[in-house]
Image (cartoon, rainbow, N blue to C red):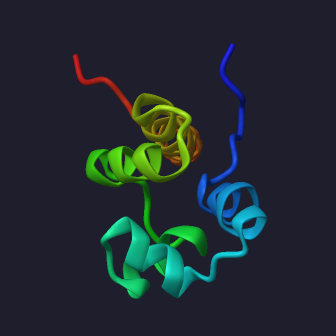
Amino acid sequence: MPMKNPPHPGPSIRHDCLEPLGLSVTEAARKLGVSRKQLSSLVNCRSGISPEMAIRLDKAFGGGAEVWHGLQTAYDFAQAKNRADKSKVELKK
């Protein structure tokens, strides 16, 4: 059963991947082959995990690219559902 309000996966990357290895965002970005800005945006919940980033995260930290991408998809879906629940949608006959 999916979580009603799953967290953004960015903080998990910081707390579960970067911090245990003693990596700064700058060092981790270099190892992932992305810009510091791109990784910072992700870990600070301003952007999401793309399929390409999911593959990079899997190669660097393990866990499976599908799992990384699935965390983002669950978050995005929950956010969209919350927005849809607040809007009025009427079917035309």
Foreground residue, 86 or 46? 46
Q: Please say if 42 is above or below 7.
A: below
Q: Please say if 33 is above or below 84.
A: below
| Residue 44 place in picture, x, y as percent | 60, 75
Give me the residue at 70% from left, 66% from top: 21
| Residue 35 place in picture, x, y as percent | 33, 82
Give me the residue at 43% from left, 76% from top: 29
Foreground residue, 44 or 35? 35
The C terminus, quarter of image: top left
Q: Residue furthest left?
A: 93
| Residue 39 place in picture, x, y as percent | 46, 74
Q: Residue 1's image quarter?
A: top right
Q: Is residue 35 left or right of residue 61?
A: left
| Count of marks placed on residues | 0
Foreground residue, 80 or 28? 28
Q: Residue 13's image quarter?
A: bottom right
| Residue 48 place in picture, x, y as percent | 43, 58
Q: Please say if 87 is above or below 3.
A: below
Foreground residue, 69 or 30? 30
Q: Is residue 85 left or right of residue 4?
A: left
Q: Is residue 82 left or right of residue 14?
A: left
Q: Is residue 35 left or right of residue 42?
A: left
Give me the residue at 55% from left, 49% from top: 61
Q: Residue 90's image quarter?
A: top left
